[in-house]
Image (cartoon, grey):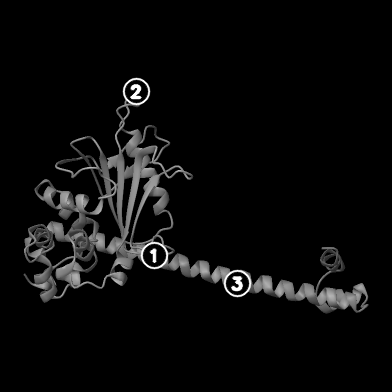
Amino acid sequence: MLIKRLLDPKNDVAFKRIFGQEKNKDILLALLNSVLKKQIHQPIREVEFLPRVQDPETRAKKTSVVDLMCKDEDGCMYIVEMQVASDGNFKNRATYYASKAYISQANKGDDYEGLQKVIFLAFTDYKLFPQKGSHKSDHQIMDVVTYEQDLEKLCFTFVDLVTFAEQNKKPVEALTLEEKFYYFLRNAETIDPEELEKLIANDPIISKAFHELNKAYWTNDELIQYDEEEKRDMDHRSEIAQGRREGLKEGLKKGREEGREEERNTLVKGMHNAGAPLAFIAKSSGLSEEEVKRILDA
């Protein structure tokens, strides 16, 4: 396998190809079982893929489109997302997607007894929770005093691939299956040939995942879709970066204006305290006498 032929698994098209196909259910099961150890009570043996589009109950409500959604043999639902850039709203969207999946289980006239657990799993290519020391965080609804999980139907797991890359000091051959998946998602496109051999050695699941990234096995139409998604990701990142730059400029401008205003107000009050007449203060500061009075009265 030529390394230059490996595509980026974080790309939406590639991500769905690896984890969202019937023929690759074994890869998805290995991912869920290795990453969600704290969220599941027993290994997941089988999953059924569900529609990624969650239709709204009314026209006024939003349609939800997730990367991957499935349910296991017990009815527990899983939403799997790959987020490559911060848009400032992902935590809110995660809550919305999980809640929408939970609500969607209830048909009119049903009781609530049959509602099954929803687990939201997200991989981010940026620091979603920069204040946390770990690359992985599990979130559940708990009693803030006793820490009991009385409301157990909504769970969230977030994996920060950037922090994992910074914290990981293990050689690839020493990684656990869970860590191999993180390494794979973060580094597959640029992995060194020797590291690749060590990573897939005696590990058919990871080897199969890499095989799905070899563009020699992709059709021209699939590669076009991949490239279009790459362009959308780049455009999205550029829009976010531009927004941040404009926000910074606006913040600096506002700060300068507020600083000048504070300096002017200090000057006005200083002249007043020194006994300068109102007309003199107004002329010196370029303000009207009414504006000077407002500053002095503040």
Which residue was labeled with disc 1?
A: 133
Q: Position of residue 252 (x, y in %)?
A: 58, 72
Residue sitting at x 89%, y 76%: 273
Disc 3 is placed on an element classified as helix
Q: Position of residue 15 (x, y in %)?
A: 21, 56
Q: Is residue 237 depicted above or below 76 in this figure?
A: below
Q: Is residue 231 depicted above or below 58 in this figure?
A: below
Which residue was labeled with disc 2?
A: 111
Which residue was labeled with disc 3?
A: 253
Task: Decide which of tag 1 and tag 3 comes sooner along the chain.
Answer: 1
Amino acid type for the residue under numbered disc 1: Gly
Q: Residues within 10 Å of mark 2 (few under 14, many from 20)?
A: few
**Residue closest to the eye, 279 or 122:** 122
Q: Position of residue 203 (x, y in %)?
A: 9, 61
Amino acid type for the residue under numbered disc 3: Lys
Task: Report the quarter where the C terminus lies.
Answer: bottom right
Which image quadrant for residue 46?
Answer: top left
Q: Residues within 10 Å of mark 1 (few under 14, many from 20)?
A: few
Residue sitting at x 37%, y 32%: 57
**Residue closest to the eye, 220 or 32:** 32
Task: Report the quarter where the N terminus lies.
Answer: bottom left
